[in-house]
Amino acid sequence: MNNKENWSLATKAVQGGWDPQNGEPRVAPIVQSTTYKYDDVESVAKLFDLTAEGHMYSRISNPTCDVLEKKIAAMEGGVAALATSSGQMASTIAITNIAGAGDHFIASGTLYGGTVALFTNTFKKLGIEVSLVDASLSLEELKAYIKPNTKAVFAETIANPALDVLDFEKFSALAKAAKVPFIVDNTFATPYLCRPIEHGADIVMHSTTKYIDGHATSVGGILVDSGKFDFTNGNFPEFTEPDESYHGVVYTKDFAACPYIVKARVQWIRDLGSYMSPMNAFLSNMGVETLHVRMDRHCENALALAKHLKAHPKVSWVNYPGLEDHKDYALTKKYLSGASGVLTFGVKGGKTEGEKVMNSLELAKIVVHVADVRTGVLHPASMTHRHLSDEELVKAGVSADLIRVTLGIEDIKDIIADFDQALEAI
Ligand SMILES: *Cc1c(COP(=O)(O)O)cnc(C)c1O
């Protein structure tokens, strides 16, 4: 018996998305082909009409990417997924697929720096307005941001690098009040620690560059459609009226099960040309096969280092949502089965002394990355977030002395010894 729908997450991570038939490769192969062959003209016409399933061109779909899409959709509990060339492209299409010039959306203020830049600068050029809100406001206060042209509510499960934990109940109620999709960036939590769709999310996205790949080899992103949002509610005419750019397709009618992903693929991915490459899909799929095993170790190591640094006389503060005195600990307990592998801290003496510590680390390398098997450190104010104004830095939860640590899966004894020797430098 092969009841894949009911497989647990670990089994889906290993075996999901690829079900080889007699004599086919056990491992989902890299289909490094832009092009596909057909027996007759009619077969191709059906593909273009979207009346037959299949691949026509690797800018729009590809069998290797398809495996990753099916697997992540299954792990998140969604109905369909779309792989993109980066997490940034997933964030871009997550919004442009439902909001255009003259529209508005609401996003939590504590977001990844690249997402803040995209939402506030580039989207402004496209005529899309964002309200970055203080996520600690009450539901009533948040509702004041809803406008007649509001099209989405966006937030991160665990904010990078503020490490705030999302209040799903409040934000999904906000999206419901606005009658718009609730989009969640689940990059830091991964479907292993949190499945946003179970807590009211309509669309889930990832930078697969992080824990999904897990080995720092491949930039990529993915969008997952829960299939639950009602795009026929009157707010989204692009979904309910014929798309003249695609033979008059009506997404909510012709693709009622997953209109969001089909529209994103045949409009945005087709036109922008920002699909994931087969090689990156292969590597990301290999990474996700061990996600459930890696995440436990990432969480364990982060909690252990957080506790150690907290007790260290040269450390002024530690921020990790798995610590019992973290302001969001109750949300961690409610929504996450682990607080993930990233923590932040500051040392006594602030930025200058913090730089000394970073420069003295040996095992933990200075990298502009998080969420892979190797421990690394970053100083957001001078690196990833340096383009943000002081005010935006505060909103993003980044102080000048903040050092972000991404815990790998090495032996925690060696990691702690490395931080101890580096703290000796100050
Ligand atoms: C890294 C990251 C992104 C952007 O992803 P890329 O793959 O780097 O384009 C988006 N959201 C979060 C939470 C991230 O950490």
Image: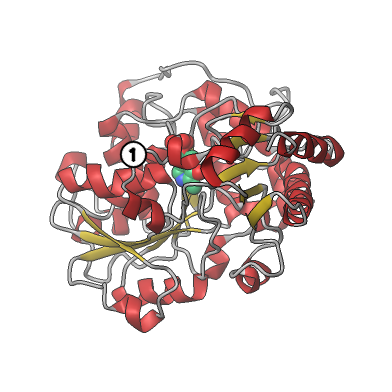
Three-letter residue code for mark 1: His
The answer to whether 258 appears left or right of 294 in the picture is left
Towards the viewer: 46 or 151: 151
- Reading the image, the residue beneath label 1 is 387
Instruction: Kindly identify the residue that appears in the image at 50 percent across and 75 percent down.
Output: 169
Q: In which quarter of the image is residue 332?
A: bottom right
Q: Can residue 87 be seen in this view?
A: no
Name the foreground residue: 400 vs 334. 400
Drawn side of residue 66 relative to residue 173, left or right:
right
In the current view of this chain or complex, which residue is farthest to the bottom?
140
Q: Residue at x 46, y 76 (%)?
A: 170
Residue 280 falls left or right of residue 274: right
Above/below status of 102 relative to 295: below
Name the spot of residue 378 as percent of width and height, x first. 56, 36
Total number of numbered discs in the rendering: 1
Q: Which of 150 and 74 is in front in this view?
A: 150
Does the rendering let one see residue 45? yes
Above-or-below relation of 29 to 70: above
Q: Where is residue 137 in the image (x, y as percent from the top left)?
A: 40, 76
Q: Where is residue 156 in the image (x, y as percent from the top left)?
A: 48, 56
Residue drawn where x is 30% and y is 74% of the image: 178
- Bin the neighbour count of mark 1 within 10 Å (Cα to Cα): few under 14, some 14-19, many 20 and up: some
Q: Quadrant of the C terminus?
A: top right
| Closer to us: 379 or 44 | 379
Give the colour scheme shown.
secondary structure
Element marked by disc 1 = loop
